[in-house]
Image (tube, grey):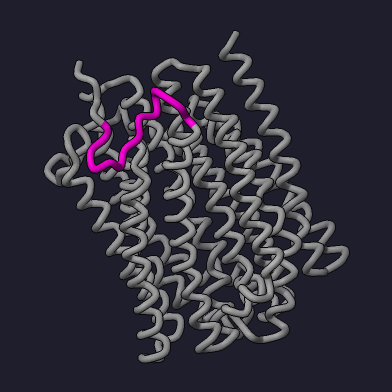
Amino acid sequence: MAQLQLHRHGTNIDMLHGPLFGKILIFALPLAASMMLQQLFNSADVAVVGRFDSPQAMAAVGSNGAAINLMVNLFVGLSVGANVVVARCIGRNENDKIHDAVHTTISLALISGVILLIWGLAIAKPILTLMNTPEDIIDLAVVYFRVYFLGMPFIMLYNFGSAVLRSKGDSKRPLWSLGFGGVINVILNLIFVIGLKLSVVGVALATVISNAVSSIMILYFLMTEEEPFRFRFSDLRMKREYISQILKIGLPAGIQGSLFSISNITIQTAINSLGSYASAGSAAALNFDFLTYYVVAAFTQAAVTFTSQNYGAGDYGRCRRVFTLTMSAGVIFTGIVCLACAVWKTEILSLYTVNPEVLKYAEVRMIHAVAFLWMCNIYEVSGGCLRGMGYSMLPSVLVLLGCCVFRIVWVYTVFAWEKDFAILMDVYPVTWTITGTATMIAYYWVRRKLSA
């Protein structure tokens, strides 16, 4: 069987041979840049309505995040499974299986997108009502939610298609497509909100269009790939073998993400109980929460992909080095972003709002939560390495208990006793510490088990 050639366009990385650290950075940094770029473009929605519309419109856009993530994360988790399945085929040099795995992945993306579109349109008002969305913003929030979900097929296609490209080390072209789509998003935000006065409808519509552009570019890259990665619509299929593997790895990750979102919905509901200024301030700072977390996510994805390929190749020693390097780099690079957010919090938050009451809440979130987000690497990278080795359920259960359950308990006990925004935000570093400790212990236990 011929050895796979993974160097076309200079975008792919040989993860199985040679030094690791430079390759991990080459993989992770463009991925971090793409996700951060995506967040910057998404945060343009909040910034534009915050500066050129009203605090209520800003809160309506920002308060949707937890509910949207609840529905989307289950399917995005499946893309993690797709990444692992294709990467293992590469590690085992199974050229003949890659073609079917790729086409099964894209088929799953399209089906997931349609399901989410229908689901989102139906559940928008009930879920936002359940979250105690303030009366003065709920109508705007429902409109934003429904228009946003019109773009779900494009969002799923981008995520699953990017997972295929990343499985062979290509994190650059997802960045290119996202960057181009993001520029379009910002331009359309300004046109729709300032020029056409479309408020939340305008920013949601701009997001849909930009996601469509990014996904079409990803699809083009896949259609022009060399075999066995080349995508053809005529070859779309749902192979049971690959569906079961994707579900085995991706479903626990997706359930983890969705349950994570349930805890965040509980927190968002608590924030909403403090009024629309608290919701708006939290929404402004949440952009930097996401921005920082995406650095964590990039090194986690590197851990998943590098571990998957090397585990498939049977090189357990190299898997251990992947863990050490991705964990160290993740903590360092995320720490730099956290420090910048803490030091220049007032300056960067003023890009979103000049309302002093909104700024007060935003700065509290920056100090009590965003500044400590580097701690997420401990459980995310450990969990990523576990998933790359086929242990997907274990980290999901630990995150469920350490983050999700504990956060809900915190809201109904600690926050209920003292309804203070700062106390509510303290739940984040507390749960990151608990979950990180448990997941790190689990990783070393599994590693010792495999070495025995």
Q: Position of residue 330 (x, y in %)?
A: 59, 43
Given residues 24 and 252, the one toward you in this image is 24
Q: Determine the residue positioned at 51% across, 81% down.
A: 139
Q: Position of residue 154 (x, y in %)?
A: 31, 59
Q: Magenta includes 374?
A: no
Given residues 202 and 331, the one toward you in this image is 331
Which quadrant: the C terminus?
A: top right
Q: Position of residue 393 (x, y in %)?
A: 55, 32
Span highlighted in magenta in the image: 6-20
Q: Determine the residue positioned at 36% across, 78% down.
A: 187
Q: Determine the residue positioned at 51% across, 58% down.
A: 69
Q: Is residue 161 left or right of residue 314?
A: left
What's the magenta bit mostly, secondary-structure-wise? loop
- In this rendering, does residue 272 appear at all? no
Q: Determine the residue positioned at 32% across, 40% down.
A: 164
Q: Position of residue 229 (x, y in %)?
A: 22, 36
In the rendered view, tell whether residue 123 sits above or below residue 87.
Answer: below
Given residues 268 and 368, the one toward you in this image is 368
Q: Magenta includes 19?
A: yes
- In this rendering, does residue 208 appear at all? yes
